Image (cartoon, helix red, strand yellow):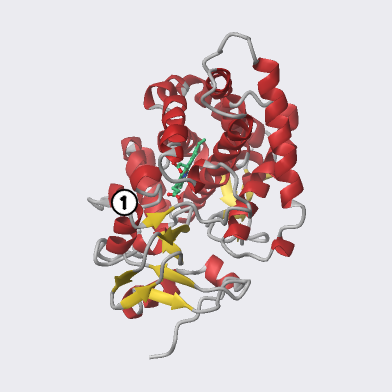
Amino acid sequence: MTTITIDLTDPEYRLNPWPIYERLREEAPVMYAKGQAYDGSDFYVLSRYEDVTACLRDKKNYSSQITGQNYLNLPLLVNRDAPEHTRLRHMTNRAFNARLVRTLGTWVEELVDSLMDRVLAGDSTEFVEAFTTELPLRVVGGMLGIPLDRKADLRRWSGAVMNMFAVAAGMDPDEAPGFFEDLVEFGNYMGTLAAERKGKPNKGDVLGSLVAEHEEGMLDRDELATMAFSYVAAGHETTMNLLGGGMHMLLSDPGLAARLRAEPHLTASFIDEYLRMYSPTQWLLRRTCGETELHGVHIPQGALLHVLLGSANRDPRKYPNPDVFDLDRENQGDHMAFGAGRHFCPGAALSRLLAEHAFNAYYKHLDRFSLDPDDPPQLRSRQGSYGLARMKLLISQ
Ligand code: HEM
């Protein structure tokens, strides 16, 4: 048995992590990655479904506050424990509740149709840029009251938040030059936007709710700005990975496409099985609150844990033949792609809504699209995030 090494800088670990996940699950369910972070520090890796779920649900022994007090310690929801998390999360639940999300259906459908019409007007398209990036940005940006002319900035800011997480996880900051300046700029922009809305009636959108909370003294200015960060960053890249991956799968698997076009009610299963196999968020971070022992490995207090959602979702103990895409799998909905426990993704209903509308539009126009054989799709190489960076499609008129 050879020693398993996790090289966070190795593109292979980002683009094809499945073989290493399998080895981890079988040979080292708690792996001690001694000195394997970019800065030479240690971390531990959990890879089995049972351990990943238990860790995410155990708020007593595992903390989400992964950064030090004076380093990238922004009041982000995802980065906080109770009681602060409970307060911030309560507001988020109100802003993204299922009832509100359902009212967005018509708006989302119109957005999908107009983006699709635009894409179909040409002979070819870079679909990630033209559609999968555009849809979640417009939706989340719209909910936050960010005007369309700031779209390019919004994308840059969203990337900066993702890079902040990667740096907090140990990525060399030089790999993400300028990310901190972009974060500050985004925070200031949201502050200005919120100031303009002060004292005005709440339009019922997310920005309006945040401003109302701020005016009632329940949210300070930094929190208001960073809540907006959370929604843009958490909602954009993840959803775009689902939207792009879904299209790629439909174009690469004619049998699957034919079945879904004939039975569109299976779209919810398609979304779940896709998320299970290709989780847009491949891993989360936690810190141990005290010493603990798991599978015979001693984990010290304050240790950084990489909690591999992407591996948990392919654990054969939970999913027989885990590497097979199976629309009829009974327990596909138990996947960990949206996390678990108190930090469970509050945007799950919204991203499902976007994917439902987008995939139904794909079914309708699928015959007109094909992958460009001269320009194959490319995966993104951002740490911990899995999905397409680029997908050139040819369109028949
Ligand atoms: C396919 C799409 C999505 C995936 C796979 C996804 C995945 C996740 C995961 C795994 C977490 C848990 C983080 C943790 O436990 O540390 C999370 C949290 C979060 N997600 Fe999503 N997400 C998606 C879409 C969205 C959308 C559309 C939004 C909002 C616009 C959103 C907002 C958030 C926020 C604010 C959190 C932090 C919640 C907390 O810490 O309490 N997500 N997401």
Q: Going 57% across and 22% down the picture, which residue do you hit?
A: 214
Q: Going 58% across and 21% down the picture, which residue do you hit?
A: 211
Determine if residue 379 is in view: no
Q: Which residue is tagged 1?
A: 57
**Percent position of residue 287, x then y:** 44, 60
Q: Nearer the viewer, residue 61 or 21?
A: 61
**Secondary structure under the numbered disc 1 in the rendered image:** helix
Q: Going 66% across and 40% down the picture, which residue do you hit?
A: 130
Question: Looking at the image, is 253 positioned above or below residue 298?
Answer: above
Q: Nearer the viewer, residue 105 or 328?
A: 105
Question: Looking at the image, is 142 positioned above or below residue 129?
Answer: above
Q: Is residue 226 left or right of residue 50?
A: right
Quadrant in which residue 38 is drawn: bottom right
Q: Residues within 10 Å of mark 1 (few under 14, many from 20)?
A: some
Question: Looking at the image, is 164 positioned above or below residue 144?
Answer: below
Location of the C terminus by quadrant is: top right
Amino acid tagged 1: Arg
Location of the N terminus by quadrant is: bottom left
Q: Nearer the viewer, residue 300 or 254?
A: 300
